Image (cartoon, coloured by chain):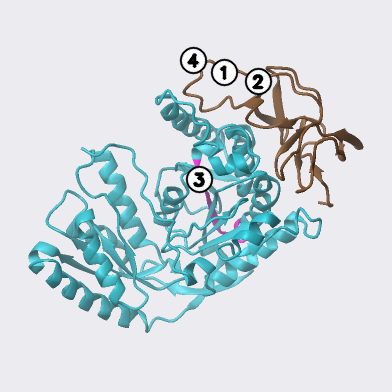
Chain colours: A brown, B cyan
Amino acid sequence: MSVKVAYVVDEFKDNVATILSNDIKKGMTIPVTFDGKEHSVTVNSDIPYGHKVAIRPIKQGETIWKYGLSIGRALCDIEVGDHVHVHNIEPMRGRGDLHSEKKGCAF
Amino acid sequence: MTKWYGFRRPDGQVGCRNYTLILSATIYANSTVERVANTIYGAIPITHHLGRCQTKSDLKMTFDVLCGLAKNPNVGGVVIIDHFREELCNIDDMAHEISKTGKLIETVNIRDAGGVLNATAEATRKAMYITRELSTYKREEADISELLFGLNCGTSDTTSGIASNPALGFCSDRIIREGGRSILAEFPELMGAEPWLKEKAVNEEVARKIDEQISAYEQRIFATGEDIRGSQPTGDNIAGGLSTIEEKSLGGAKKSGSAPIQDVIGYAEVPGKKPGVYMMYTPGHGAESITGIAAAGSQVLVFSTGGGHTIAHPLMPTIKITGNINSWERMNDTVDLDLSGILAGKLTLEEAGDLIYDEVVATLNGKLTKAEILLERTGFAIHRIGISI
């Protein structure tokens, strides 16, 4: 694996990349390789090391893809460059609460 | 083929350590066990809060775990201590079960000995003779095919799934190519990874069991009516960038590499003999999970951690690895192997897998983990399937 500031596991299916830098601040433009070429993604907030950034637009309710498989769904519309984490996506598995509590987007 | 050198037990299993185990049958023998172990060179105490007032199936699981730990080939001899008389978790039933290995066993009942002071003296004397005898045992040549290799991860972050776990998968594949077996556990942390795992099942029956057993754990979670976020993913997983249990699972499953999955087994159950991966039904709780693996007879376990971890089983050397440079810098007094070179572009996953493999073989041959040197024994806990009554 070559040095990357953002890493996409399944370059043709995933809609998020993992940040591999301690220095990603709001407004920075970073290179991300997917769909067979390098793209520029401008991040919309500070993103900590190991956290995810959206590399494709994701509508509320759509699946979040990583490793080419589902890691949950969007709680709200997510723009390219948005920090993707517990505030805007939710798991679909192991949810004993799903029918007992209303869920919503933090933003 | 790599050789290693271990202690061959009467039942043919080979251990990488030669411990005298001081084993508590019930909670009320714990202090006596601690006194004895504190007096005996190199002895390992196992104490716990169980052994009585449990539902039957839960008590049987506790019994299987305690006996399984004593049967682990890293243990050369055992002194079992109980306090009066319990169902199953008593010196007679436990000694009977453990004696199937042919290893040295002594027992002490606190009441029969005339109280804790006499019991301490009697058990200490017995442990002394066992330890002296074990000290004459020599390491003998063994094969990688005699290795039951434990896989686990914890305080995971997003580096786990893209660096240390897939590297561990390469190591596991290499061990299995040489005839060994691996155990993949932590079933709630495999929710969402079923499609990837089932592709590797040796047949339809095993694929069905993978679905069925992961689903069984999910049903137990559903029964609570609770949102598991915060528990799965844990607070430290979330701090490390993991957002959902599915994301954690897909990363966690990578530890098992590409080798065939031979079977799905119960908690602390001894797997079959065919080389390959065996999936053990355990919780994601690290100490409970690795204790199930140790009780199945695993000699060594590699624990992949993104955030850094202190976990170490008292009887099964627990080699900790990380792919996160920040965690290596903070936690390298309990993490053994730095794999941050993967994400720095300096190591391929396969090369990192070879580094893990070399560390595993060195540990099997007697190299101590950092946790062993520091007497960090945070990795023992018994999983429960019933209630205290």
Q: How far apart are labels 2 and 1 at the CA level? A: 8 Å
| Whether label 2 touches label 1, CB < 8 Å | yes
For the point 41% across and 63% down, which residue is it?
Answer: B314
Decide which of tag 4 and tag 2 comes sooner along the chain.
2
Q: Depth-wise, is mark 3 or mark 1 nearer the camera?
A: 1
Residue closer to the observer: B284 or B203: B284
Q: Chain of mark 2?
A: A
Q: How far apart are labels 3 and 1 at the CA level? A: 31 Å
How many neighbours does mark 3 have within 10 angstroms: few (below 14), some (14-19), or many (20 or more)? many
For the point 70% across and 44% down, which residue is it?
Answer: A50
Q: Depth-wise, is mark 1 or mark 4 nearer the camera?
A: 1
Residue B371, horizontal then vertical, whole percent: 50, 66
* Marks 3, 1 in one chain: no
> In the visual, does A11 lie left or right of A99?
right
Residue B245: in sight, yes or no?
yes
State the residue position of label 4: A99
State the residue position of label 2: A75
| Whether label 3 touches label 1, CB < 8 Å | no
State the residue position of label 1: A103
Q: How far apart are labels 4 and 2 at the CA level? A: 16 Å
> In the visual, does B222 lie left or right of B59?
right
Residue B29, horizontal then vertical, whole percent: 21, 60
Q: How far apart are labels 4 and 3 at the CA level? A: 29 Å
Q: Circle 2 — which element?
A: loop
Q: Would you say residue B272 sits in the magenta stretch? A: no
